[in-house]
Image: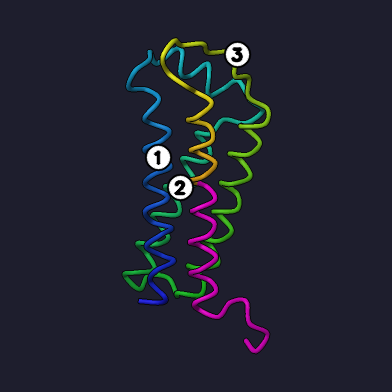
C-alpha cells in the first residue's frame, strides 16, 4: 500500500484536474470560458492533456506495460510540467476578461493550483516510495 498510495493520489488528482477544468463550462457559455482560458500566456488545457498522460502512464504501470521506476519518473516529470503550466496561466491570465456575477473565477484558478500541487505531492510520494531519490540506486 505504501507504494500505491502516491500513485492513487496522482490518479485522483489527475481526474480532479480534468473535473475542475470542465467545471467552468457548467454555468457559463463555451465562448466565454474559452476566452477566459486563453487569456494567459499558456492555456490550462495543456495541463489537462498532460493530466490525461499521467492517467495513461499510471494505468500502463499498473498493468505491467511500464516498469514502476519508469512510470514514477514519468508521472513526476509530467506532474511538474502540469504545475508549471497552471502557475504560468494563473499568474499571466487576466481575471477581468470574465466578470460573471455570482461565480468566482479566481477561486477556480486557485483550486486548479491546489489540485496541481496535490498531483506533484502524489507523484513525489510515488517516486520516493520506489526509492528513486535514494543515493544507493
Q: In the image, which disc is placed on residue 96?
A: 3
Q: Is residue 30 above or below residue 113?
A: above
User: Could you give the CA–CA distance between mark 3 and mark 2, rounded to whole angstroms?
Assistant: 27 Å
- What residue do we see at 48% from left, 19% from top? 34
Viewer-nearest residue: 66 or 133: 133
Q: Is residue 71 left or right of residue 137?
A: left
**Number of the label disc, if any, that sits on residue 51:** 2
SS assignment for the magenta stretch, majority = helix
Residue appearing at x 31%, y 70% in the figure: 63
Say whether disc 1 or disc 3 marks the residue closer to the N-terminus: 1
* Contact flag, marks 1 and 2 (Cβ < 8 Å): yes
Residue 127 magenta-highlighted: yes
**Magenta residues?**
116-137
Q: Is residue 35 above or below residue 109?
A: above
Whether pointer 3 and pointer 2 mark residues with C-beta atoms closer than 8 Å, the reply is: no
Counting from the top left corner in percent of width and height, residue 22 is at: 37, 31
Q: Please tell me whether residue 83 is drawn above or below residue 44 in the rendered image.
A: below
Amino acid at each position: 500500500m505504501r507504494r500505491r498510495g502516491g500513485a492513487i493520489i496522482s490518479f485522483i488528482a489527475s481526474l480532479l484536474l480534468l473535473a475542475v477544468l470542465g467545471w467552468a463550462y457548467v454555468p457559463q457559455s463555451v465562448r466565454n470560458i474559452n476566452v477566459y482560458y486563453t487569456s494567459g500566456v499558456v492555456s490550462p488545457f495543456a495541463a489537462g492533456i498532460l493530466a490525461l498522460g499521467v492517467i495513461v502512464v499510471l494505468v500502463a504501470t499498473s498493468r505491467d506495460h511500464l516498469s514502476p521506476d519508469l512510470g514514477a519518473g514519468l508521472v513526476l516529470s509530467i506532474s511538474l510540467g502540469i504545475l508549471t503550466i497552471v502557475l504560468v496561466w494563473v499568474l499571466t491570465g487576466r481575471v477581468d476578461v470574465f466578470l460573471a456575477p455570482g461565480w468566482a473565477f479566481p477561486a477556480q484558478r486557485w483550486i486548479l493550483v491546489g489540485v496541481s500541487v496535490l498531483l506533484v505531492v502524489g507523484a513525489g510520494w510515488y517516486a520516493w516510495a520506489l526509492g528513486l531519490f535514494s543515493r544507493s540506486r
